[in-house]
Amino acid sequence: MASISIRPPWMLPDRAVTPENIHRRRREFLRQLGFVGSGLAWGPSLLAQTPATNAPAAGPQEARRNPEFSPKLPLTPERIVTNYNNFYEFSTQKDRVAQLVGRFRTQPWSIWVGGLCAKPMTLSWDDLMKVAPLEERVYRFRCVEAWSMVVPWTGFPLSKLLAQVEPTSDARYVKFTTVLRPDEMPGVQRLSDYPWPYTEGLRMDEAMHPLALIATGLFGKPLPKQNGGPVRLVVPWKYGYKSIKSIVKIELVREQPDTLWNALAPNEYPFESNVEPNVPHPRWSQATERDLATGNRIPTLPYNGYADQVASLYPRK
Ligand code: MTE
């Protein structure tokens, strides 16, 4: 994976189209990943996900707002949050994602949680809804591209889910994987050189931090597909690409896992990726951000405003 050298298109204008080089290298690329021939080398198949007997809730996700995790901030309008999306499996054009998710099936859904733990398990949607009471949290969300929003997520702490599988002391990292269904995801076909599936990771102590959220809704409704429905991660003190969407696999591992963006451009998308206004991206400043609600540029806060809660995780800084 690391040998693939592709310039990530983060800085392309929103409407720019990714070059089409695709079909020639696609088969070869999938073979390298193990998707052709013998199939996946690990875990459950992401291409043919284990059917669950039940489906994501259709109705509103009623959850009480948790004031401890909800600073009093004006919310970004729902229509912006749900129509300005980064979800490369569908499109690199933010305003196209919501239009392209129609064929993406999110029912039934299940998540496999395993690896270095005593009780690996596959959770059906109903199982997931029983992990912990749903709560609403208003989080700042800061993309590495220097735009930001404020979103009321519904969900529960990732730590509650991890506790269920009883991680062993060998587990030092958590690796997350997005579902991969090229037939339903036009962006996967278009960006055939990318090391799909989308993967991300956290250190174990980051994953156990109370701010790390498994989100199943926003604005009191089930999570829209374009925002990573039916279930995603939200890590508000890190750049948005760490908040992986449409998760089907969570694995406890010993070594720092590969992640899609880190594999593509390690110097631009490091594994840690905390929001750090004083550390510019190699191609742009991170000192300010565009507030999507107002269009104004505002200063970026260390750890995206969560320094009091998380700075102790990073004592060297
Ligand atoms: N997860 C997957 N599977 N694929 C993606 O392309 N984009 C990331 C992150 N999670 C992405 C993903 C990036 S770059 C950002 S900024 C956020 O999702 C965007 O989330 P939003 O569309 O809900 O605002």
Image (cartoon, grey):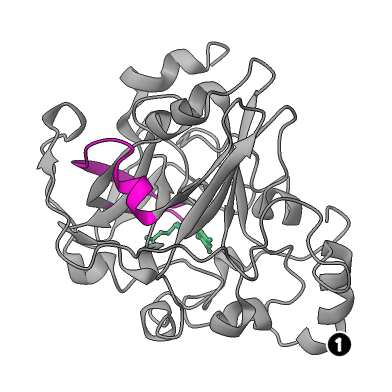
Does the beta carbon of the residue at mark 1 sit less than 8 Å from ligand 1?
A: no
Q: From the viewer's perspective, is 11 left or right of 19?
A: left
Vertical relation: 187 (above or below) 303: below
User: Which residue is disc 1 drawn over?
Assistant: 24
Which is nearer the eye, 54 or 184?
A: 54
Quadrant where the image shows the N terminus: bottom right
Q: From the viewer's perspective, is 213 left or right of 60?
A: right
- As for residue 137 lying within the magenta part, the answer is yes
Based on the displayed image, in which of its 4 quarters is residue 67 positioned? top left
Secondary structure type for disc 1: helix
Give the magenta range: 125-149
Vertical relation: 299 (above or below) 222: above
What amino acid is found at the position of numbered circle 1 in the picture? Arg
Q: From the viewer's perspective, is 28 left or right of 242?
A: right
Q: Which residue is found at the position 41% from the left and 24% from the top? A: 209
Q: Can residue 147 be seen by looking at this rendering? A: no
